[in-house]
Image: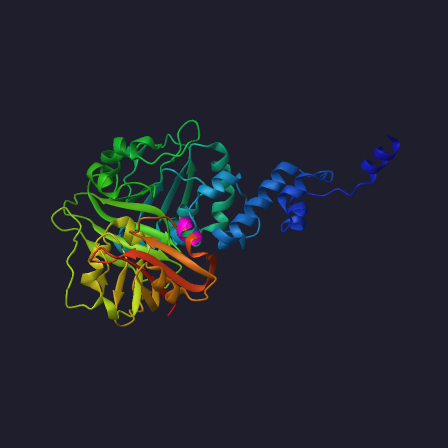
């Protein structure tokens, strides 16, 4: 007992900041099992270390800024990435001229990643958040994060901020997509706040409203529910669809433009305009195209597939679709900027034992994809006795004439 008392007396005191700096690279789970030095709030420090470790990959500029405070893990996982926040900033810059950017308000501030990206565009930026803890973090973080803060008047406030007092040029809303029990929700009217109930008031108080919604949401249904939508942005990062952005402008009445974006890749931004209330589509096949001699195969990125505009690719690029339901396209020459994955075809066969044996040969591993094919990847992989990985890509699909085919590819 006396020995423990002496340990406590002579133990080196350490501040929270010193502890975080010293153990920032360590495993949080292991740190939680160790006794903290005197003067250290272990729970707070572990939250900061874990937050910084997540920010290194998702929010690199935040991680490079010393002294920021991070929320609990769930808020870190739910917040936007820097890439998607920067993209929103670009949309605002394009649609709102500099002379029309006096005031903005983020009605669902959260951690403030989107707010920090867009606020410097405006003379006055208002952050609104219902949770006191997140407001406290925002008050600490924002002045360090937002560039040009000297020329931007920043306000942090609770959720009772009266919209009617000030006329805004831009309002941003990212409704919480979880119910009271913490379960994920998708529908607009299941989110908090319910944008459907407040959209007319939002448009009455601004020139432009941007609403971030779940990537699982049906775009056509959302367009039936939301008013004055001028643009829809289907935003993916490295091939994974992350969010849908609906931009609403006062008085807009024509069909919206759909932007399909795959960030952190060499995909170009693809834009389709709605026509007569429906997405333009082309299901026709040019029979003069000889499918026996195509040299390159393409798989559209997730933004294009989510928007449901993949069939317009035959109008934008010199490609043909293998089958109306396959979502695979082919060409005779390489198209470097096709929006999606690109492959060089090295062989093709039917699904006879002889054909597959000749195509696969002594291959022991491959990246296997199934498109419009009557089995799943796991079953086919067992049948072919192929491990996952390697530099070879196999596509099992259905051709235009209804026959099944295996296409072997490599990256061009």
Location of residue 241 with respect to 359 vertically, above or below = above
Asked if residue 318 can be seen in this view, the reply is no
Question: Percent x, y for residue 265?
Answer: 38, 61
Location of residue 194 with respect to 394 vertically, above or below = above
In the picture, measured across the screen, residue 182 lies left or right of residue 206, that is right
Outermost residue, bottom direction? 333
Question: Percent x, y for residue 364?
Answer: 48, 62
Outermost residue, right direction? 2
Q: Quadrant of the N terminus?
A: top right
Residue depicted at x 40% and y 64%: 360
Question: Percent x, y for residue 171?
Answer: 31, 42
Q: Nearer the viewer, residue 9 or 49?
A: 49
Residue depicted at x 41% and y 49%: 379
In the picture, measured across the screen, residue 380 lies left or right of residue 23, that is left
Task: Decide whether the magenta segment is chiefly helix, strand or loop.
Answer: helix
Part of the protein shown in magenta:
378-382
Asked if residue 49 can be seen in this view, the reply is yes
Outermost residue, top direction? 180
Q: Is residue 358 magenta?
A: no
Location of residue 1 with respect to 404 vertically, above or below = above
Question: Percent x, y for residue 257?
Answer: 21, 52
Q: Nearer the viewer, residue 312 or 67?
A: 312
Which quadrant holds residue 36? top right
Q: Nearer the viewer, residue 86 or 257?
A: 257
- Indicate the colouring scheme: rainbow
Outermost residue, left direction? 276
Q: How many marks?
A: 0
Location of residue 341 with respect to 30 vertically, above or below = below
Residue depicted at x 57% and y 45%: 50
């Amino acid at each position: 007992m006396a020995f423990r008392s002496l340990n406590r007396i002579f133990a080196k005191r350490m501040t929270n900041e010193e502890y975080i700096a010293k153990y920032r690279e360590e495993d949080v789970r292991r740190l939680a099992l160790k006794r903290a030095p005197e003067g250290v709030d272990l729970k707070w420090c572990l939250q900061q270390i874990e937050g910084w470790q997540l920010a290194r990959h998702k929010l690199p500029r935040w991680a490079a800024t010393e002294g920021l405070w991070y929320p609990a893990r769930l808020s870190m996982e739910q917040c936007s990435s820097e890439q998607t926040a920067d993209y929103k900033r670009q949309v605002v810059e394009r649609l709102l001229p500099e002379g029309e950017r006096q005031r903005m308000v983020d009605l669902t501030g959260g951690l403030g990643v989107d707010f920090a990206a867009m606020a410097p565009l405006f003379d006055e930026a208002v952050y609104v958040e219902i949770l006191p803890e997140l407001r406290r973090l925002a008050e600490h973080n924002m002045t360090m994060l937002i560039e040009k803060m000297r020329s931007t008047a920043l306000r942090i406030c609770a959720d009772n901020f009266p919209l009617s007092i000030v006329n805004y040029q831009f309002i941003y809303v990212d409704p919480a997509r979880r119910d009271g029990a913490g379960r994920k929700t998708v529908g607009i009217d299941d989110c908090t706040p319910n944008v459907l109930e407040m959209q007319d008031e939002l448009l009455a108080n601004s020139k432009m409203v941007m609403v971030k919604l779940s990537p699982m949401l049906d775009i056509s249904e959302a367009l039936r529910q939301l008013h004055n939508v001028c643009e829809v942005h289907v935003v993916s990062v490295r091939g994974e669809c992350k969010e849908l952005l609906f931009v609403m402008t006062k008085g807009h009445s024509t069909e919206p433009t759909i932007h399909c974006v795959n960030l952190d890749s060499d995909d170009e931004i693809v834009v389709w305009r709605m026509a007569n209330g429906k997405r333009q589509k082309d299901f026709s096949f040019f029979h003069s195209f000889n499918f026996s001699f195509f040299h390159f195969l393409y798989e559209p990125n997730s933004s294009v597939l989510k928007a449901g505009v993949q069939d317009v690719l035959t109008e934008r690029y010199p490609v043909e679709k293998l089958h109306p339901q396959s979502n695979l396209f082919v060409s005779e020459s390489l198209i470097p900027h096709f929006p999606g994955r690109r492959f060089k075809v090295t062989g093709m066969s039917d699904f006879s034992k002889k054909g597959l044996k000749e195509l696969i040969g002594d291959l022991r591993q491959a990246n296997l994809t199934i498109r419009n094919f009557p089995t799943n990847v796991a079953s086919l992989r067992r049948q072919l006795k192929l491990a996952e990985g390697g530099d070879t890509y196999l596509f099992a699909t259905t051709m235009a004439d209804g026959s099944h085919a295996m296409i072997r590819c490599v990256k061009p």
